[in-house]
Amino acid sequence: MNTLPENHYLNARRGLKSWLFTLDHKRIGILYLYGIIGAFFIGGVLALLVRLELFGPGRDIMDAKTYNQFFTLHGAVMIFLFIIPSIPAALGNFLLPQMIGAKDVAFPRLNLASWYIYITGAVFALYSIHSGGVDTGWTFYTPYSTETTTSVISMTLGIFILGFSSIFTGLNFIVTIHKMRSPGQTWYKLPLFVWALYATAIIQVLATPVLGITLLLLILERAFGIGIFDPAMGGDPVLYQHFFWFYSHPAVYIMILPGMGIISELISVFSRKKIFGYKAIAFSSLAIAFVSFLVWGHHMFTSGQSEIAATIFSFLTFLVGIPSGIKVFNWLATMYKGRISFDTPMLYGLSFLFLFTIGGLTGIFLGALAVDVHLHDTYFVVAHFHYVMMGGTVMAFLGGIHFWWPKMWGRMFSSFWSTVAWAIVFVGFNMTFFTQFILGSRGMPRRYYNYLDQYQPLHAFSSVGSLVLAVGFIIMGIYLVHSLFRGKPAGNNPWGALTFEWQSTSPPPTENFVKPPKLTHGPYDFDKISPERTFP
Amino acid sequence: MTGNSSKRKAEHILSLRVYLLVGVALMILTAVTVAVSFIPLGGWNAVVAVAIASVKASLVALFFMHLLHDKRLNLIIFLIAILFLTIFITLTMFDTLTRGTVDERTRSPIQEEAVIYQKTLPDSLKNNLIEDDSSIFKDTLRP
Amino acid sequence: MEKDKGYGPGQPAHHFSEIEQQTEAVKLGMWIFLLTEILLFGGLFTAYSVFRAWNPDMFINAHKFLNVMLGTLNTVILISSSVTVVLAIRSMQLGRREKTIFFLVATLILAAVFLVVKYFEYSHKFHLGQLPGKYYTFTGVEGTNPHIFFSIYFSMTGLHGLHVLAGMIAIGWMLVRTVRRNFSSEYYAPLEATGLYWHLVDMIWIYLFPLLYLIG
């Protein structure tokens, strides 16, 4: 019988002020978790409304101008308020110091500031909904974004501010990992989730500043007509796209790398087997971080860049798929001859393997210049990125949430309902988005309010899928919240894992460890040690 | 916690002389770069100017910012920043310098004069809102 | 001697185990921040490169209206301020608090002079109508779209000027903390980090100056 520890980080100090002025990385992670769940809810509602409108051609529930605003906001909210911070800021903040045996991150006050900056950026971005919306698409392409009367400046200022939150988190993590590992914990003894956070942080600090200057220049272009991006003012709209995608392509690796880190943890623990190819996985994360900066032009194959540049970017894009492929093979090899258990985190892990592979491969299709000319700006692209972002990152995020839920709150959720929710989410996801591969390859353009009758059955099916997805998430919300009040105490190590955070109580004490953890084994040494599950 | 001086590694404190010499060197290089700018070298002016600036920047980085004697990681971070900036500029200019070389029709329209130099602003450039009835879909729109 | 947030000489913050670890972490953190600043300005250098390559003659014609003498003066001022700030840090390394204060004040004065010079340059341009983008009314530059040169000039020097201002605030805060005896020869990492930031501001100007003022 497990019991909750008497003193832990959640009850150490009580009251709103103890949360709003906390320097405890775990509390900051929880604060971020609330924020990103809120953002996911807002972005999700926007998505449902978009899909509802697309149920039939012509007007269903809104006019075209409003529709443009809805898909723009869905994209901007999901990308900048949900997915980019999600794993690093919520799970990373909670876990990183524990995984390296540290008491906190390198700069705790900067960490809290990052959260306040996140909230401030969110306020600016969401205010734009009130002040007239934005209808440019989340990519804010010029010259439309410099001329439209919608609230571009409010939204871009919000995203500019959010960028700082991302940068400071990345900076904090890099310094923490370099300077605060426990004695004897060399780089090759780190959990792969830490390697993933490290590679992500590198991308965050290198790429986000360029988004900053891009949005700044966009604001100046709108306010003063400086003439860099608007052809009417002598500028070049393709140059805007170079600037924008120099950040936004590496940004998608900010989204996926931490998810891949989680998958490494899940696959190993739930196969009860040492991870196959530790160094390959670790270095592939760094390789992805580097190569991700060389491929941005593949978003611009049909925009008007030169043919020579397009060809170069297409070639480089094929290279970036290789390290991801290496990871997938290593995860599969880890599972081979392992003792696999199908707890909910593993169900999400397995879903990731399947769905991310589809998403990644379709990315390679799109990377082929000649193919992309036909598929660009169709639903094929929409399906591709939802497969990698939702089928990939969100599945990994949900796997991580379920895996570390007992550690964060000390309580276990219902495995029956979590399995039900997973199944509904998995089915709903594929209903919604696999259909869109078909829609796109048959010529349905993206961001279109209206469409020809022949696409209606597929659109309707996809919209029904989105409702199924919603049901799955609602069930998830219910059993997770229920577990906070009625869940059974989970014990220190419910899953029998080997990384440091499982050596402390669930929930952990504020200082993370009563005694500093001793490094007696590697994070995946299931061949040497067989830790007991404390649950059930 | 206290009294760790025996474990503290010897700090490298540069002498006043080194700092002043580097400062003087920077001033001299400034004078040189201004002087060279008056010599017409065509396209090479830009190259020489950037080269001299890079020497100055290196002096600032190595001596004023202590990179010469500091932990190597800090130097690596600085070089990585330069590397990625170079990647950004280079790959972007792969595009901007080669427009229209394969197909003349894709040549950049940048050479055209901006609207602000024209007497009147055409209506199409005033704040435009996309209207509902796009002409392509006029016949296929459902009410 | 006033205790500052629990750490004086030899005592690190609660999540660090040794003062050297804290010093190294602070410096590493600042270097990463400088990396982000290089990429931030990098976007403007890219815009400069792209437009200069497209319109080399217009750039040369337009830049003639920049005052090389004032630009050189500003370069000398910033280099001097880099010298004074590094001497401030050196003084603290040797435990000489009064000298540190002196050099920090000298740095602030030089930075202020830099901004004053820039004010004169800007107001002269406004007077002539050499304004960014759609407010540009000057007619004396030959070439297509000369307002783009001035847009880039104002963006680059404007962003740089904001960083000078931010640097002055940071140095001012370091001055306050030095007066309050928060630093010693054992621990002065924030001071050193601020110095690093200031040197980057100088370095950016070292590139801006020839690219904008000395094109040929």
Image (cartoon, coloured by chain):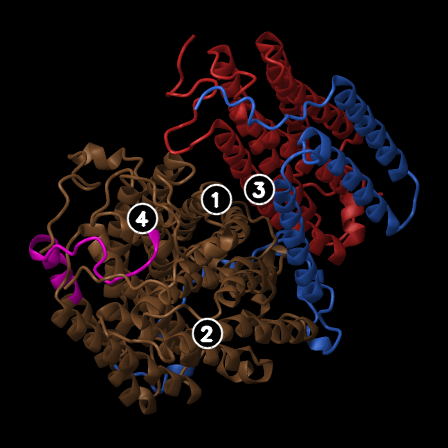
Chain colours: A brown, B blue, C red
> Do discs 3 and 4 belong to a common subunit?
no
Residue C49 among magenta residues: no
Q: Name which residue lies at 50% across and 53% down.
A: A187
For label 4, the residue is A94
Question: Quick one: label 1, few (<14), some, or many (20+) residues within 10 Å?
Answer: many
Which amino acid type is shown beneath numbered disc 1? Leu
Question: Quick one: label 3, few (<14), some, or many (20+) residues within 10 Å?
Answer: many
Residue A485 among magenta residues: yes
Secondary structure of the residue carrying numbered label 2: helix
For label 2, the residue is A330
Secondary structure of the residue carrying numbered label 4: helix
For label 3, the residue is C37
Looking at the image, is mark 2 or mark 1 earlier in the sequence? 1
Write down the quadrant of residue B87 in the picture. Answer: bottom right
Residue A312: x and y in percent read 66, 73
Secondary structure of the residue carrying numbered label 1: helix
Residue C90 in sight in this render: yes
CA gap between label 4 and label 2 equals 27 Å
In the picture provided, is A391 more to the left or to the right than A252?
Answer: left
Give the foreground label among 3 and 2: 2
Residue C25: x and y in percent read 50, 36
Give the foreground label among 1 and 4: 4
For label 1, the residue is A171
Q: Which residues are magenta?
A: A476-500
Write down the quadrant of residue C137 in the picture. Answer: top right
Point out the residue furthest to the front here.
A528
> Do discs 3 and 1 belong to a common subunit?
no
